[in-house]
């Protein structure tokens, strides 16, 4: 993936709260609130069950964590990340550019269908963060909180994907993850989020997650043709290697893979919340090949793959 050197970056879509609070060791101390907090993550339910922690009840939050309402401090991003050229050389700036591209696409797609997309920030944090959905530690992985409409990410998760999940990694892995989380934002705007309940192979949760994977594929398809404010696409190049990295990641975060490799070693479909690895690859591919959000109707699909 490459970025157009001359296109401007919009850092207002990022809230940089790294280093404001949290720190290590939070996961073990946070009691899991009674469920139903409504966050949607990439692998989050697994991590709950694996480590017995992650999110607390919304009220109160944890002492020492920066508040979810804070907008962070973007000074260093503002100095570093001005153009696509910066995105081609600096990792943080590449993340800014990816978020910009994803939201440019959905703004234009909503507009084409006669509705309005509301942009929503991605919040960078380290260690732990208070959100509109409760306090979260990095253990839960990247997630979207419908209550405050923000994407939350501790960028160290991508290192974890390589070391713990065995993923190939690479920048397009990160693009896939962010596009998946923005898929949840789209679902929040369209009202489909509330259908994402229950567990099991055909549950609403699985259908919601597979749709977010499909939406990620749809964005990937349009990434190099979606004009930014400059009139030119911010992303100039998405290669087959990029797509294979997204699919590799999808194959590492399916419920069956996680249960087998990182959990108890046995597949228990009744606990599925995100879909199998094969299903996650299939739905990303559906989005990538068709480029049509309407093809991502996992809720009507009789066969999820
Ligand atoms: Zn998700």
Image: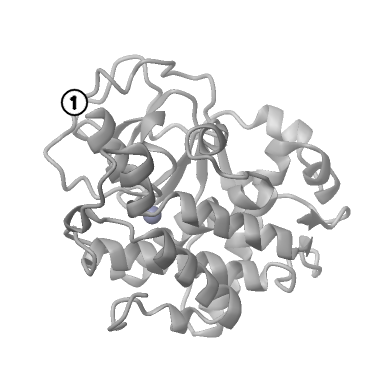
Q: Quadrant of ligand 1?
A: bottom left
- Residue in the image at 84% along x and 57% along y: 4
> Where 37 sits versus 29, above or below?
below
Q: Nearer the viewer, residue 185 or 259?
A: 259
Q: Residue reaching furthest front?
A: 265
- Residue in the image at 82% along x and 46% along y: 88
Quick check: 116 left or right of 204?
right
Quadrant (top left/top right/bottom left/bottom right) for the C terminus: bottom left
Percent of width and height locating residue 274: 33, 57
Quadrant (top left/top right/bottom left/bottom right) for the N terminus: bottom right
- Give the quadrant of residue 296: bottom left
**Number of callouts:** 1
> Where 93 sits versus 175, above or below?
above
- Give the quadrant of residue 203: bottom left
Tell me the crowding category of disc 1: few under 14, some 14 to 19, or many 20 or more residues within 10 angstroms, Cα based.
some
Q: Nearer the viewer, residue 13 or 181?
A: 181
Residue 186 seen in the current view: no
Residue 157 seen in the current view: yes
Percent of width and height locating residue 277: 42, 59
Q: Which residue is mark 1?
A: 31
Q: Residue reaching furthest left?
A: 34
Percent of width and height locating residue 118: 48, 62
- Residue in the image at 33% along x and 61% along y: 275
- Residue in the image at 31% along x and 37% along y: 47
**Local secondary structure at mark 1:** loop
Quick check: 215 left or right of 82?
left
> Where 155 sits versus 60, above or below?
below
Q: Nearer the viewer, residue 176 or 275?
A: 275
Percent of width and height locating residue 80: 77, 33
- Give the quadrant of residue 128: top left
Confirm or reject: label 1 Cβ below 8 Å from ligand 1.
no
Quick check: 261 left or right of 197?
right
């Amino acid at each position: 993936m490459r970025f157009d050197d001359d296109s401007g970056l919009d850092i207002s879509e990022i809230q940089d709260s790294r280093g404001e609070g949290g720190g290590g060791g939070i996961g073990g101390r946070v009691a899991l609130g009674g469920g139903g907090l409504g966050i949607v993550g990439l692998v989050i339910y697994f991590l709950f069950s694996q480590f017995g922690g992650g999110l607390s009840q919304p009220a109160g939050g944890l002492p020492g964590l920066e508040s979810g309402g804070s907008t962070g401090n973007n000074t260093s991003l503002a100095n570093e990340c001005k153009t696509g050229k910066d995105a081609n050389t600096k990792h943080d700036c590449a993340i800014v550019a990816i978020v910009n591209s994803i939201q440019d696409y959905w703004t234009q797609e909503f507009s084409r269908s006669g509705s309005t997309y509301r942009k929503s920030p991605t919040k960078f944090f380290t260690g732990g963060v208070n959100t509109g959905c409760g306090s979260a530690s990095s253990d839960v992985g990247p997630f979207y909180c419908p209550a405050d409409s923000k994407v939350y990410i501790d960028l160290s998760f991508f290192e974890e994907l390589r070391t713990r999940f065995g993923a190939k990694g690479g920048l397009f892995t990160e693009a896939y993850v962010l596009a998946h989380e923005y898929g949840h934002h789209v679902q929040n705007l369209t009202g489909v989020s509330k259908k994402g309940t229950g567990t099991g192979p055909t549950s609403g949760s699985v259908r919601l997650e597979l749709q977010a994977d499909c939406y990620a594929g749809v964005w990937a398809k349009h990434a190099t043709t979606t004009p930014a404010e400059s009139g030119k696409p911010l992303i100039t190049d998405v290669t087959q290697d990029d797509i294979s990295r997204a699919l590799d990641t999808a194959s590492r975060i399916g419920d069956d893979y996680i249960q087998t490799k990182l959990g108890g070693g046995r597949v228990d479909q009744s606990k599925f919340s995100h879909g199998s690895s094969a299903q996650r690859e299939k739905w990303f591919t559906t989005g990538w090949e068709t480029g049509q959000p309407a093809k991502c109707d996992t809720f009507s699909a009789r066969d999820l793959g």
